[in-house]
Image (spheres, rainbow, N blue to C red):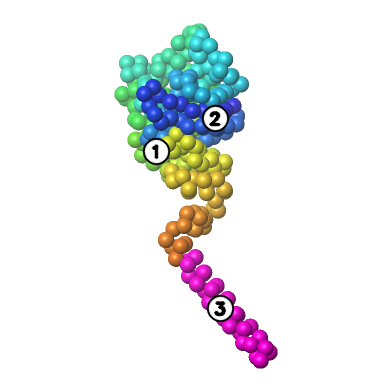
């Protein structure tokens, strides 16, 4: 469904790449979190997928479309396959909820009759069936986020990219947004979510791809956790135990924390003492036999 093969991106005038030899494969119907600090390369990766940016080198394929052969006139068709929920939502303040969702269909030439059939269904999907005549300014933050999701789903894309969909929302509303994305995923849509919300990531335990300084440093295929540290993210490629204590213990031991270093040193001293005692016991009889 989504394939990036050794993708590198330099912006003009920059000596360091914003994406550095990135290889990533996302299967159809997967739900994937992309995590990383600001400036890590997440936004550039998304722009690559929507063809807002081109790679300096490497190959990108989405839904069977090889971007090496993608003509400019084909880009609108590509973007119909990819729904994007932007971090700033980009809702039209002077249009109603119904009109905001309808706009996504109008710009691709869908008939008015089809729009009248489709928009109510999409609003019902996101739990806003009774908000069609409201304006964005009349809605809560969570409701506006749902309008943005409805607009991105109106064209029934195979892939939905959500950029920080729970930003500035309280935990309860954030959980509701993630349940909605899960429901959309259950319908067969591939979901890619960028987020800084560690609590949401750790609760959902889906695949987690970690990017740092333009490189993918961790790819937890399932039961993923939010780790931005390179060594932790690589350790976390292995499935972690359900117990938070055992998971933390595994990472602490593997990352040579002071506690684990002290334990290892004590263990080495104990082993050396045992070896010395055994050597002393075996050496004495040999000396008497030689005499």
Q: What residue is shown at x 54% (from left), y 73% (from top)?
A: 272
Q: Is residue 37 above or below residue 115?
A: below
Q: Secondary structure at mark 1?
A: loop
**Residues in magenta?**
263-291
Q: Nearer the viewer, mark 1 or mark 3?
A: 3
Residue that label 2 marks: 6
Going from N to C along the chain, the mark reached first, 1 or 2, is 2
Q: Which residue is mark 3?
A: 276
Nearest the viewer among 82 and 61 is 61
Q: Is residue 175 left or right of residue 65?
A: left
Residue at image coords 56%, 29%: 5
Residue of label 1: 37
Residue 289 magenta-highlighted: yes
Q: Is residue 280 visible?
A: yes
Q: Position of residue 188 (x, y in %)?
A: 59, 28
Q: Secondary structure at mark 3?
A: helix
Front-lying residue, 256 or 148: 256
Q: Residues within 10 Å of mark 3 (few under 14, many from 20)?
A: few
Where in the figure is residue 127, as x and y percent of width and height? Answer: 45, 29
Q: Is residue 38 above or below residue 234?
A: above
The answer to which of marks 1 and 3 sits earlier in the sequence is: 1
């Amino acid at each position: 469904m989504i394939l990036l093969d050794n993708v590198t991106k330099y912006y003009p005038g920059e000596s360091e790449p914003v994406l550095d030899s990135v290889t990533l494969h996302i299967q159809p119907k997967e739900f994937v979190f992309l995590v990383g600090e600001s400036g890590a390369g997440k936004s550039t990766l998304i722009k690559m997928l929507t063809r807002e940016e081109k790679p300096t080198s490497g190959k990108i394929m989405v839904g069977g479309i090889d971007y090496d052969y993608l003509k400019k006139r084909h880009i609108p068709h590509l973007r119909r396959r990819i729904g994007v929920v932007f971090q700033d939502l980009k809702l039209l303040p002077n249009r109603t909820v119904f009109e905001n969702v309808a706009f996504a269909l109008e710009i691709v030439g869908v008939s008015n009759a089809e729009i009248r059939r489709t928009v109510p269904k999409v609003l019902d999907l996101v739990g806003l069936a009774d908000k069609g005549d409201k304006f964005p300014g009349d809605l809560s933050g969570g409701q506006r986020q749902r309008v943005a999701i409805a607009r991105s789903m109106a064209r029934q894309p195979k892939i939905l990219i959500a950029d920080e969909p729970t930003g500035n929302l309280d935990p309860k509303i954030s959980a509701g947004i993630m349940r909605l994305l899960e429901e959309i995923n259950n319908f067969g849509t591939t979901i890619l979510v960028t987020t800084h919300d560690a609590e949401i990531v750790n609760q959902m335990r889906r695949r987690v791809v970690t990017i740092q300084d333009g490189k993918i440093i961790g790819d937890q295929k399932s039961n993923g956790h939010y780790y931005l540290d390179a060594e932790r993210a690589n350790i976390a490629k292995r499935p972690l135990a359900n117990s938070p204590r055992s998971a933390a213990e595994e990472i602490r031991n593997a990352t040579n924390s002071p506690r684990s270093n002290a334990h290892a040193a004590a263990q080495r001293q104990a082993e050396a003492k045992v070896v010395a005692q055994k050597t002393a016991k075996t050496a004495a009889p040999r000396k008497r036999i030689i005499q």
